[in-house]
């Protein structure tokens, strides 16, 4: 088994009235997967959304879709600790095809072209599995449980190895006709600019994505992102009003 680089975290299991493991401990849980260009994370949560265990690994170690899915299956089985996994949700970098569960051709995952990721994970774990753009899911999470509560329209910008956005319009996720709305990282700033991994020149991502920052400072992407997070301020705008600035 490949070990996660960040180490796993697991909350204590609930106990019965006498302090032992009672029948109530056979619970249904859900699993969430965050697939990125630098890392992959997996978490198991209760039905109320409370995360009880998580782990992560570097994509540089897993490399291929098949090995990544094998690792995810191993981790979900271990982290669920015998509880029934009811469903799995995958947040993946775009472009994605949620209707078919496909990872189409993500620029930050070379070689992952038309990967039927939802079907592969479903086969490995044995429960219904759903795929969506990672920025869209992050935007939905913020809308329901974070700074977006109380608004009907918001834009959530996600910035990591790549740059993306989740659009909530009138209380609903808007992903466009082909599921690619909000791909702000590939908006062209300078048609004569540097070549991006998506094949275009002068994209937002080629200037300020995690990969671009790592090249500028001469360190690995993960380190560059950690440094820049500590040195910069991020401001979110929800329904036209700025949220409190966080360092």
Image: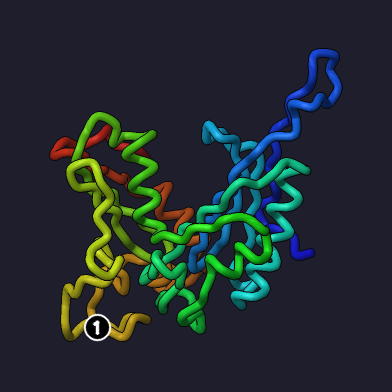
Horizontally, is 83 left or right of 46 in the view?
right
Q: Position of residue 161 (x, y in %)?
A: 43, 65
Q: Is residue 105 visible?
A: yes
Q: Which of 190 and 150 is in front in this view?
A: 150
Q: Position of residue 73 (x, y in %)?
A: 69, 60
Q: Can residue 217 be seen in this view?
A: no
Q: Position of residue 202 (x, y in %)?
A: 23, 78
Coloring scheme of the render? rainbow
Element at label 1: loop
Q: Nearer the viewer, residue 202 or 247?
A: 202
The answer to which quarter of the image holds residue 57 is bottom right
Please identify the quadrant where the C terminus is shown. Answer: top left
Q: Please, is residue 165 above or below residue 28 in the view?
A: below
Q: Which of 51 and 37 is in front in this view?
A: 51
- Disc 1 target residue: 201
Q: Please, is residue 133 above or below residue 16 in the view?
A: below
Horizontally, is 57 left or right of 188 in the view?
right
User: Which residue sits at x=16%, y=78%?
Assistant: 190
Please identify the quadrant where the N terminus is shown. Answer: bottom right
Q: Nearer the viewer, residue 17 or 142?
A: 17
User: Which residue sits at x=76%, y=43%?
Assistant: 81
How many marks overall?
Answer: 1
Dot 1 surroundings within 10 Å: few (below 14), some, or many (20 or more)? some
Q: Please, is residue 24 above or below residue 63 in the view?
A: above
Taking the view exactly as shown, the residue that stands out farthest to the left is 240
User: Which residue sits at x=56%, y=56%?
Assistant: 128
Q: Position of residue 211 (x, y in %)?
A: 42, 71
Taking the view exactly as shown, the residue that stands out farthest to the top is 17
User: Which residue sits at x=51%, y=53%?
Assistant: 89
């Amino acid at each position: 088994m490949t070990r996660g680089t960040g180490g796993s975290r697991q909350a204590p299991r609930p106990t019965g009235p006498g302090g032992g493991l009672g029948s109530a401990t056979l619970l249904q849980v859900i699993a969430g997967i965050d697939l990125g260009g630098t890392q992959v994370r997996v978490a198991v949560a209760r039905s109320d959304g409370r995360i009880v265990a998580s782990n992560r690994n570097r994509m540089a170690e897993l490399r291929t879709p098949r090995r990544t899915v094998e690792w995810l299956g191993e981790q979900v089985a271990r982290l669920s600790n015998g509880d029934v996994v009811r469903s799995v949700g995958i947040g993946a970098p775009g472009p994605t095809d949620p209707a078919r569960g496909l990872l189409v051709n993500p620029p930050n995952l070379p070689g992952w072209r038309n990967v039927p990721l939802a079907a592969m994970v479903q086969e490995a774990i044995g429960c219904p599995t759903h795929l969506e753009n990672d920025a869209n899911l992050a935007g939905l999470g913020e809308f329901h449980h974070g700074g977006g509560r109380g608004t009907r329209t918001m834009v959530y910008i996600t910035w990591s190895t790549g740059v993306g956005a989740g659009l909530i319009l009138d209380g609903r996720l808007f992903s466009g006709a082909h599921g690619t709305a909000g791909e702000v990282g590939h908006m062209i700033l300078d048609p004569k600019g540097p070549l991006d991994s998506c094949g275009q020149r002068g994209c937002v991502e080629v200037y300020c994505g995690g990969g671009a920052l790592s090249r500028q400072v001469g360190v690995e992407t993960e380190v560059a992102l950690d440094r820049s997070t500590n040195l910069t301020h991020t401001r979110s705008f929800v329904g036209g009003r700025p949220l409190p600035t966080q360092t």
